[in-house]
């Protein structure tokens, strides 16, 4: 099956499986990622597929996610055990492979790292991470117009900006920050300002 057929099939399948607001977000991420891929020279179909599947495990309960990880020997950090919003990326990568038959490592890694980021991200990983943050259905955040502009001009600066704001936000509200996010921030902060 050609990748364009895969992305169209996924769109139809996910529309049936996801709640309407999650599906709207998913469409926003997929099409934002595709637009960014056009601009930055990435594979547009891979961006669509990763965008469609990035949150495929998000609607599962935290307990279900932990069970999938434990059953399939997927490492879970202490921070992930305590924070439901992080673990869905690892479970999503697993489901992309086992439920949706996606075996492309680049796509799987983009799904895996879309919540925390990591050091030295691939082009597709950056695009999915950023698209998840800037897609049109996101509630307006301070500085979002600038970040959206950066997304189409300088991916590293945009990534550094998002990571900076995320780390500051988590510190401000007293929430713990995943090690992968801190490592990504340390790696990319040289591009911010």
Image: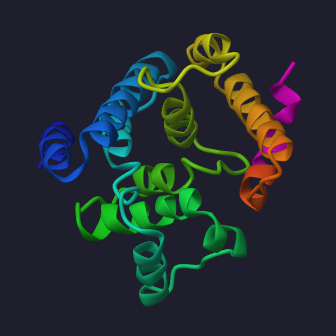
Give whichever of 187, 104 is nearer the camera. Answer: 187
Percent position (x, y) of residue 124? 50, 39
Give whichever of 60, 87 is nearer the camera. Answer: 60
With respect to residue 116, does 166 lie above or below?
Answer: above
Percent position (x, y) of residue 172? 85, 41
Q: Which residues are magenta?
A: 184-193
With respect to residue 105, does 95 lie above or below?
Answer: below
Q: Residue at x 44, y 73 (%)?
A: 65
Q: Residue at x 56, y 19 (%)?
A: 140
Q: Is residue 162 left or right of residue 95?
A: right
Percent position (x, y) of residue 67? 43, 83
Give whichever of 97, 27 is nearer the camera. Answer: 27
Q: Residue at x 76, y 47 (%)?
A: 184
With respect to residue 83, does 172 lie above or below?
Answer: above
Whether residue 174 appears in magenta in the rendering, the answer is no
Q: Is residue 62 left or right of residue 180?
A: left
């Amino acid at each position: 099956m050609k990748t364009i057929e895969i992305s169209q099939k996924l769109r139809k399948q996910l529309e049936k499986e996801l709640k309407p607001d999650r599906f709207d977000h998913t469409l926003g991420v997929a099409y934002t990622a595709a637009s960014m891929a056009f601009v930055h020279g990435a594979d547009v179909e891979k961006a669509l597929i990763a965008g469609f599947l990035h949150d495929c495990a998000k609607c599962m309960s935290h307990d279900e996610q932990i069970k999938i990880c434990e059953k399939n020997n997927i490492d879970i950090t202490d921070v992930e055990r305590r924070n439901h919003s992080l673990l869905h990326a690892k479970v999503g990568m697993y489901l992309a492979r086992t439920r949706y038959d996606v075996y492309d490592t680049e796509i799987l890694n983009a799904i895996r790292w879309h919540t925390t980021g990591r050091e030295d991200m691939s082009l597709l990983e950056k695009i999915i991470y950023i698209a998840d943050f800037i897609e049109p259905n996101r509630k307006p955040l301070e500085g979002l117009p600038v970040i959206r502009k950066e997304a189409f001009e300088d991916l590293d600066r945009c990534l550094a900006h998002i990571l900076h704001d995320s780390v500051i936000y988590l510190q401000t509200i007293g929430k713990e920050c995943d090690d992968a996010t801190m490592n990504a921030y340390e790696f990319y902060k040289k591009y911010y300002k």
